[in-house]
Amino acid sequence: MDKIVVLDFGSQYSHLICRRIRDFSVYAELVPFSISFEELKNLNPKGIIFSGGPSSVYNPDAPIPDEKIFDLGLPLLGICYGHQLIVNKYGGKVKRANKEYGSSLLTIENDKDLLNGIGESVRAWMSHGDEAEEIPPGFKIIGHTESARAAAIASDEKPIFGIQFHPEVVHTEQGNEILKNFVLKVCKAKQDWTMAEFIKNEVEKISKIEGNVLCGVSGGIDSTVAALLIHKAIGNRLKCVFVNNGLLRQDEENEIEDIFKNNFKLNFSGVDASNNFLSKLKGVEDPEQKRKIVGEQFISVFTDFAEQNGPFKWLAQGTLYPDVIESGVSKGPASVIKSHHNVGGLPEWLDLEILEPLKELYKDEVREIAKILGVPEKLFMRHPFPGPGLAVRIIGEITPEKLKICKLASKIVEDELIEAKIYENVWQAYAAVGDDKAVGVVGDERKYGNIVMIRVVDSIDAMTADWTRLPHGLLEKMSNRITNEIENVTWVTYSISSKPPATIEPQ
Ligand code: XMP
């Protein structure tokens, strides 16, 4: 398989470069900028991209890649900080400039190679504090903006390019075309990254492992697909366990058991551990503490199950790439946003090796695999649901009353979206509840009840999200039903924060 390697210098957008390239069926992998020359060479890439990053090339502690990487003779594209690295390396000059954030007009001066076929000018997304003051000898300027003379440069002799803007973000017009030009025309990479191919390779890889595998399934698409892939490779050496942690959506535990037992030939067991989870969470308010407890409880249930049903050598999980990045255990220097319970932080006493066949994939890639593997529509179309479940949608302490409100209100939100035929078009939809209360008037009487927050978001990969502009009539219906049907709810609000700066879940 042809491959593009992206060296991560710490930009928030580094992973998006891979995302965009994979969208046109070329495999792209993010690696830390500090990767050794030998390791990089072993990956056998068709081309290399240097990502952006927060540093300045003239800082003494600036991240610098292994010098020998430049001698590989492979096509090279530097983006933002990566562009400045190239300028610096080949003898140009980088200077501190006025910070430039947002969209600028990029005028194309040379439409060969990298900027081929994208027109005379495009809006390009800038986010930088430094710029190239002098380009290196043997390079030419191929595009400029009003404030950056050398916004895009190319070597005269070698397939080396630098661009000050970010082609990977949607705000750069024709950004995909620029990446395509580099990957397909300059690197001549083949478009052979398909999910059918992924399944074939992964099944082959997994079939080589020894010992039995325990897979925790949540009923979500990720763990289901992970289980089906592993099952395809090792059959009944895989046992699946579904844990009811008491933090599931309304009636979810029964629905999942039904679906698994009726559709798949997997070894499946359900365990009701709701009392363990909820008693350990009693009195806990801090969100990260809640996540930690839920994670620990899962491991403890799995360990007990393993002791009774083992021996197992492996614990399989449906971890995806965005989970890995946001938990700060990715290979690059991105900062920790939330510690996803199913990534990292596994206790040392857990004597199982971890198998995560989907950890390089994005959600829509997993959906495609689910389709190929015949996952039923009902499960397939269900929105993603966080591993810690309602623990992250109940703000503050988890009490039986808040749990009940959260379940019932979320069910109303979901049912109304299904009824309005909007459910499948949105990324996630739920109701959250905290300790805030507000005065209402019910049957002429004052009532001091809970505030419920509805949150519905659009997203492609959960890395960014926008709040969904639902029709007012639909919001009204949800609000009426929530206050009428659920005891002790007096107010309903709608969350209008996007990610960033918010996150999808409130905790
Ligand atoms: P946030 O709230 O960080 O969520 O914007 C991004 C996506 O991840 C889901 N999520 C989780 N999934 N374990 C998971 O498996 C977790 O701990 C977790 N926390 C959030 C969230 O529902 C959204 O789709």
Image (cartoon, rainbow, N blue to C red):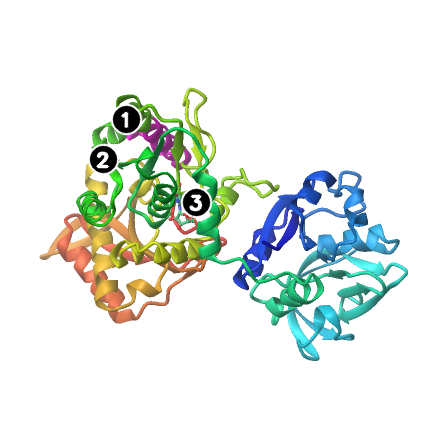
**Residue at image point 70% right, 74% down:** 116
Q: Nearer the viewer, mark 3 or mark 2?
A: 3
Q: For the C terminus, give its image quadrant.
A: top left
Residue type of the residue flagged with mark 2: Ser
Instruction: Tell me, yes or no, whether the highlighted magenta stretch contains residue 284.
Output: yes
Chief secondary structure of the magenta portion? helix
Q: Is residue 110 above or below residue 419?
A: below
| Residue 499 visible in this rendered orientation of the protein | no
In the shown orientation, is residue 241 left or right of residue 333?
left
Amino acid at pointer 1:
Phe
Give the residue at mark 2: 269
Q: Secondary structure at mark 2?
A: strand
292 up-or-down from 87: above or below: above
Q: Residue at x 33, y 48 (%)?
A: 385
Say whether residue 448 is magenta.
Answer: no
Vertical arrangement, residue 153 with respect to residue 315, above or below: below
Disc 3 C-beta below 8 A from ligand 1:
no
Say which mark, if any, is on residue 203. 3
Label 3 vs label 1, nearer the camera? 3
Labels 3 & 1 near each other (Cβ < 8 A) = no
Provide the residue designation for mark 1. 305
Residue positioned 49% across, 42% down in the render: 324
Which label's residue is closer to the chain start, 3 or 1?
3
Which of 418/234 is in front? 234
Residue 486: give x, y in percent of width and height. Answer: 15, 51
**What is the span of residues highlighted in magenta in the rendered image?**
280-299
Q: Farthest left residue?
A: 443
Q: Position of residue 341 (x, y in %)?
A: 40, 36
The residues tagged by marks 3 and 1 sit, at their Cα atoms, a distance apart of 25 Å
Type of the residue with mark 3: Val
